[in-house]
Image (tube, helix red, strand yellow):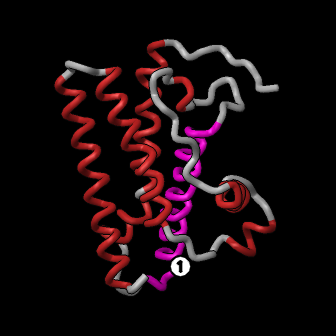
Amino acid sequence: MPRSFAKPSPTELKNGWLQLDICMRLAFSYYVWQKQFQPPNDTSDECKFMRAAALQCSLLNIRSLDEFYRPQSKPDDIRAEHYSNFPNPGPFLSDDEAKQLHQLVAHLTYRRFREFDTTWNTFHLLSRAYDRFEPFLDYIRDAEFVGQINIEASINVMKKRYKTWLSEMAALEVKRGA
């Protein structure tokens, strides 16, 4: 039987989507690091450390974004189901992908030690995440902030930024032959 939790307040709902946007931004950390900060010869320990930190940040936030579309499991979880008129499309990660991210990113496990350096296709993960996130942004803009021109404009700028990053990532994928 599903658990029952108190509904978030209207204020929590209006602010909850900002947490999701922060997750979306942070999910692009690895790409932004590669684009803006990765030196041409990044074999130093410091560069390896920063690359791993950016990748872990991206993967952890991809996991958080996916959880938004899953059923609530804790009282303070922010979930799509809280937004009553939003048609929740469900998670974008397969159960196996979610489990792998859970074990390799969110918890200290022996498996993490052996497998973290698995090749992660962050472009495909982010594309799937954004495919779920964009309709939610549209819902927020059109249902929660209708007529609030500054917020509507901010949301449109967010969407443009994410689409630009995904387009740039797609071009890199083609260039790499992936």
Q: In terms of depth relative to the viewer, which is nearer, 136 or 117?
A: 136
Q: In terms of depth relative to the viewer, which is nearer, 110 or 167?
A: 167
In the rendered view, tell whether residue 169 sits above or below residue 134: below
In the rendered view, tell whether residue 65 sits above or below residue 154: below
Q: Is residue 105 visible?
A: no
Q: Which residues are magenta?
A: 42-70
**Magenta span contains residue 44:** yes
| Type of amino acid under label 1 | Asp
Q: Report crowding for label 1: few under 14, some 14 to 19, many 20 or more residues within 10 A (C-alpha).
A: few
Please name the residue that numbered disc 1 is placed on: 45
In the rendered view, tell whether residue 130 sits above or below residue 88: below
Looking at the rendered image, the quarter that the N terminus falls into is top right
Q: In terms of depth relative to the viewer, which is nearer, 15 or 69?
A: 69
Magenta stretch, main secondary structure, is helix
* Residue 25 on image: x %, y %: 39, 49
Location of residue 22 (image quadrant): top left
In terms of secondary structure, where does tag 1 sit?
Answer: helix
Looking at the rendered image, the quarter that the C terminus falls into is bottom left
Location of residue 68 (image quadrant): top right
Q: Residue at x 19, y 33 (%)?
A: 153
* Residue 103 on image: x %, y %: 73, 58
Q: Is residue 154 left or right of residue 126?
A: left
Q: Residue at x 31, y 70 (%)?
A: 35
Q: Is residue 3 left or right of residue 163?
A: right
Total marks in image:
1
In the rendered view, tell whether residue 31 sits above or below residue 38: above
Q: Residue at x 66, y 31 (%)?
A: 72
**Magenta span contains residue 69:** yes
Q: Is residue 135 visible?
A: yes
Q: Residue at x 50, y 58 (%)?
A: 58
* Residue 55 on image: x %, y %: 51, 65
